[in-house]
Image (cartoon, grey):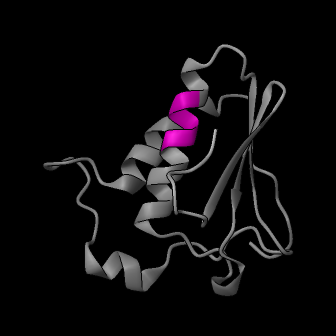
């Protein structure tokens, strides 16, 4: 399973029963954009329905887990939780909550 074609800020790989969702935006300290939240949500949602996937690891790259949200990206379209279309961050959080019971992210370097 891979992220959408042409999108490389999130890498999604399956290693047997383990899905690895890896931040790949080291130049920006892996700051998370709306598109990255969407890609991570897709990776979690498909892991939830794939009986072969038994664990998910969310990992950083090049010594950095994530600096958090990319504020410039979020200011372009601030999320409104509970109104209209579900914002990417809410979609990710809901998928993470469903899939994460008993499973946690990999901490790597700065957080």
* 18 or 74, nearer to the observer: 18
Counting from the top left corner in percent of width and height, residue 12 is at 67, 47
Question: Which residues make up the magenta segment?
Answer: 42-46
* 77 or 100, nearer to the observer: 77
Is any atom of residue 67 visible in this view?
A: yes
Counting from the top left corner in percent of width and height, residue 111 is at 74, 72
Quadrant into which the N terminus falls: top right
User: Could you tell me what secondary structure mostly forms the magenta stretch?
Assistant: helix
Is residue 10 a member of the stretch shown in magenta? no
What residue is drawn where x is 55% and y is 49%? 40
Is any atom of residue 98 visible in this view?
A: no
Q: Quadrant of residue 76?
A: bottom left
Is residue 43 a member of the stretch shown in magenta? yes
Q: Residue extending furthest top?
A: 51
**29 in relation to 17, above or below:** below
Q: Quadrant of residue 65?
A: bottom right
**92 in relation to 35, above or below:** above
12 sits to left or right of 40: right
What residue is drawn where x is 81% and y is 24%? 17
Counting from the top left corner in percent of width and height, residue 82 is at 21, 47
Q: Residue extending furthest front?
A: 5
Counting from the top left corner in percent of width and height, residue 20 is at 75, 44
């Amino acid at each position: 399973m891979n992220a959408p074609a042409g999108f490389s800020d999130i890498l999604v790989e399956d290693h047997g029963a383990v899905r690895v969702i890896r931040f790949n935006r080291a130049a920006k300290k892996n700051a998370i954009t709306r598109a990255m939240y969407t890609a991570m949500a897709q990776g979690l949602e498909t892991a939830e329905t794939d009986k072969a996937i038994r664990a998910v690891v969310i990992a950083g790259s090049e010594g950095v887990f994530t600096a958090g949200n990319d504020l410039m990206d979020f200011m372009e379209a601030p999320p409104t939780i509970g109104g209209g279309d579900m914002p990417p961050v809410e979609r990710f959080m809901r998928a993470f909550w469903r899939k994460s019971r008993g499973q946690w992210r990999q901490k790597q370097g700065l957080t």
